Image (cartoon, rainbow, N blue to C red):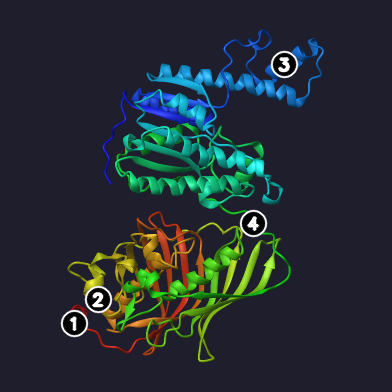
């Protein structure tokens, strides 16, 4: 959806939580950019005339010392709670005044009202005086971080109401159909979840879903829920900051965060009503129980819920790609062991593929047998197999050994081979998926070969590009750490190689070892190098390396065995290749 950029000096934003913290910094940046007007709402009162005993103190230690001395002079007994309470009141008032001053200096204008947005009556009485509100920025929020068994109803209400009831009240006080912008400050806690923040995560996820619904109902309004990661001076306590550091979560600098907000509002493109601005979150490591367990996980496969299968059809029947079976196992293991990721897979075998034909059964069983669980080395090893049963007969489809680690080793680098254009066969249009329909039967979900930069009887390197498909297209096999669609492309250059030199086609049968160091690139170029290790009339063994444009290895496959596929295809390029 394309929206005109309508923010200008006449724009009026109603901003909750807008006079302090992160939201105030965003308001100031918008004032600098557009010189617009802001109606700022917050729970902290402005102290017009500060007591004499605090007027000359501005740092925390000096201010608190002055408060303590004053209480002693009044024959009061200072306590940490009483001192902190006065300190918070003075600091909040000063911050609000500073925000109003900075907005004015930036060329905008702002009014502040001491209102709790969960109090609808007071909010409505004040906001209805402003008839020209063109946008809402909902930045208010509270924290009450505790493990769920320790949370009280009051904890939940304080956190939940500010986000959810606050949004409902704000929207009830304006004419939504006249709004040009609705910006909801959500959090990565709603997207990823976070320990101790069940209420905060729930409230923010409601903001996310609300953005989708409101955008559908009011398509002319720029609606977006921004799932912010932690900010430099946001609601990040020292304890939280330490936890973020341990999980490699980056803190958003004020300058960068406010700039990204302006960019979002200035883009004029409503591609999605939910935006994630944060570094990827690594879940805290699961403490491993020494007891080795076996899991049996049942799953139904439904053709209609997996549209990508229509792009993987062999002999007229949709076939589950081997890489999707691997993804099935990996994603399940990573859900079983939060904080751990697949590092390698060994001895993987295709026992009987899953074909959506007359013999297809809907229910399958993934059996995961724990072999090693080590808290010291932070590694987990399991044996996994996928089976199904029909008429009391068990069929085994896939099996292999999988190792998961808490920390993946650094990615090695792969040297770029020198381009050998004079040795590469000439293909007129390089549209391999139309010209080579024998081995390359793949539809758009799995297409990626662009061209070759080396090509010989022993080795080849191909440049690739995989366009990420929508979540709905991925169905029951979503892209996570492991990408089954991009990995499937790794064998496609081999198909071209085989057709060119031998006019043969093959299918994967087994794999000695797979290693993954990083996610396979998508929506950008990457490279696949293959080396033929052996070939007979019936099978072929090859190694593959997948690396990005800087040479950083994403994944390596060793000892991939393919078996010959005895079928005849119409291939217009086959005669040319021979």
Q: Position of residue 416 (x, y in %)?
A: 38, 60
Q: Is residue 3 left or right of residue 254?
A: left
Choose between 189 and 162: the one closer to the eye: 162
Task: Residue under label 2, please give it.
Answer: 436
Q: Quadrant of residue 291?
A: bottom right
Q: Which mark is drawn over residue 102?
A: none
Q: Quadrant of the C terminus?
A: bottom left
Where disc 3 sits, the SS reads helix
Q: Position of residue 564 (x, y in %)?
A: 36, 87
Image position of 241 with respect to 340: above or below? above
Image position of 371 with respect to 230: above or below? below
Separation of marks 4 and 1 at Cα, in angstroms: 56 Å
Q: Residues within 10 Å of mark 1 (few under 14, many from 20)?
A: few
Q: Nearer the viewer, mark 3 or mark 2?
A: 3
Indicate which disc, 4 or 1, sits on the residue closer to the N terminus.
Answer: 4
Q: Residues within 10 Å of mark 3 (few under 14, many from 20)?
A: many
Indicate which disc, 3 or 2, sits on the residue closer to the N terminus.
Answer: 3
Separation of marks 1 and 3 at Cα, in angstroms: 91 Å
Q: Position of residue 339 (x, y in %)?
A: 60, 58
Q: Nearer the viewer, mark 4 or mark 2?
A: 4
* Residue 17 appears anywhere in the view: no
Separation of marks 3 and 2 at Cα, in angstroms: 81 Å
How many circles with numbers are drawn on the protein? Answer: 4
Q: Which mark is drawn over residue 575?
A: 1
Task: Residue under label 4, please give it.
Answer: 285
Q: Residue at x 42, y 70 (%)?
A: 544
Where disc 4 sits, the SS reads loop
Task: Residue under label 3, please give it.
Answer: 67
Q: Is residue 456 left or right of residue 156?
A: left
Q: Residue at x 66, y 59 (%)?
A: 286
Separation of marks 3 and 4 at Cα, in angstroms: 44 Å
């Amino acid at each position: 959806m394309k929206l005109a950029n309508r923010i200008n000096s006449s724009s009026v934003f109603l901003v909750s939580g807008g006079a302090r913290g992160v939201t105030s910094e965003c308001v100031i940046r918008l004032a600098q950019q557009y010189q617009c007007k802001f109606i700022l709402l917050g729970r902290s009162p402005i102290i017009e005339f500060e007591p004499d005993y605090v007027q000359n103190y501005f740092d925390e230690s000096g201010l608190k010392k002055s408060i303590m001395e004053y209480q002693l002079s009044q024959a009061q007994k200072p306590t940490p709670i009483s001192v902190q309470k006065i300190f918070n009141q003075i600091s909040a008032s000063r911050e609000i005044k500073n925000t109003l001053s900075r907005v004015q200096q930036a060329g905008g204008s702002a009014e502040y009202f001491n209102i709790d947005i969960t109090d609808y009556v007071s909010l409505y009485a004040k906001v209805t005086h402003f008839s020209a509100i063109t946008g809402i920025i909902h930045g208010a929020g509270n924290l009450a971080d505790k493990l769920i068994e320790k949370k009280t109803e009051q904890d939940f209400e304080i956190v939940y109401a500010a986000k959810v009831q606050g949004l409902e009240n704000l929207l009830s006080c304006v004419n939504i159909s006249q709004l040009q912008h609705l910006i909801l400050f959500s959090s990565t806690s709603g997207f990823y979840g976070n320990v101790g923040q069940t209420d905060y995560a729930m409230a923010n996820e409601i903001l996310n879903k609300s953005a989708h619904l409101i955008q559908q109902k009011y398509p002319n309004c720029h609606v977006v829920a921004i799932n912010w990661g932690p900010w430099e001076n946001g609601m990040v306590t020292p304890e939280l900051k330490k936890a973020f550091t341990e999980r490699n979560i980056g803190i958003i600098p004020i300058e960068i965060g406010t700039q990204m907000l302006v960019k979002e509002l200035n883009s004029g493109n409503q591609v999605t009503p939910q935006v994630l601005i944060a570094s990827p979150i690594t879940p805290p490591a699961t403490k491993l129980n020494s007891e080795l367990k076996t899991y049996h996980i049942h799953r139904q496969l439904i053709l209609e819920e997996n549209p990508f299968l229509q792009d993987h059809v062999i002999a007229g029947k949709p076939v589950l790609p081997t890489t999707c079976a691997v993804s099935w196992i990996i994603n399940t293991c990573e859900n079983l062991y939060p904080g751990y990721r697949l590092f390698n897979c060994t001895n993987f075998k295709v026992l009987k593929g899953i074909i959506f034909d007359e013999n297809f059964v809907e229910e399958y069983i993934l059996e995961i047998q724990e072999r090693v669980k080590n808290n010291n080395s932070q590694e987990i090893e399991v044996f996994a197999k996928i089976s199904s049963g029909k008429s009391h007969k068990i069929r085994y489809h896939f099996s292999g050994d999988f190792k998961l680690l808490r920390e993946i080793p650094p990615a090695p680098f792969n040297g770029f081979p020198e381009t050998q254009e004079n040795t590469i066969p000439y293909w007129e249009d390089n549209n391999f998926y139309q010209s080579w329909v024998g081995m390359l039967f793949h539809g758009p979900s799995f297409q990626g070969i662009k061209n070759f930069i080396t090509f010989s009887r022993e080795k080849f390197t191909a440049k690739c590009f995989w366009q990420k498909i929508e979540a709905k297209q991925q169905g029951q096999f979503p892209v996570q750490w492991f990408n089954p669609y991009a990995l499937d492309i790794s064998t496609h250059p081999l198909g071209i190689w085989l057709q060119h030199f031998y006019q043969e086609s093959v299918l994967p049968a087994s794999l000695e070892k797979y290693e993954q160091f990083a996610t396979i690139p998508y929506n950008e170029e990457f490279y696949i190098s293959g080396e033929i290790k052996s070939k007979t009339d019936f099978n072929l063994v090859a190694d593959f390396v997948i690396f990005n444009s800087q040479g950083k290895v994403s994944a390596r496959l060793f000892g991939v065995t393919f078996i010959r596929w005895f079928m005849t295809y119409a291939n217009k390029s086959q005669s040319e290749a021979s």
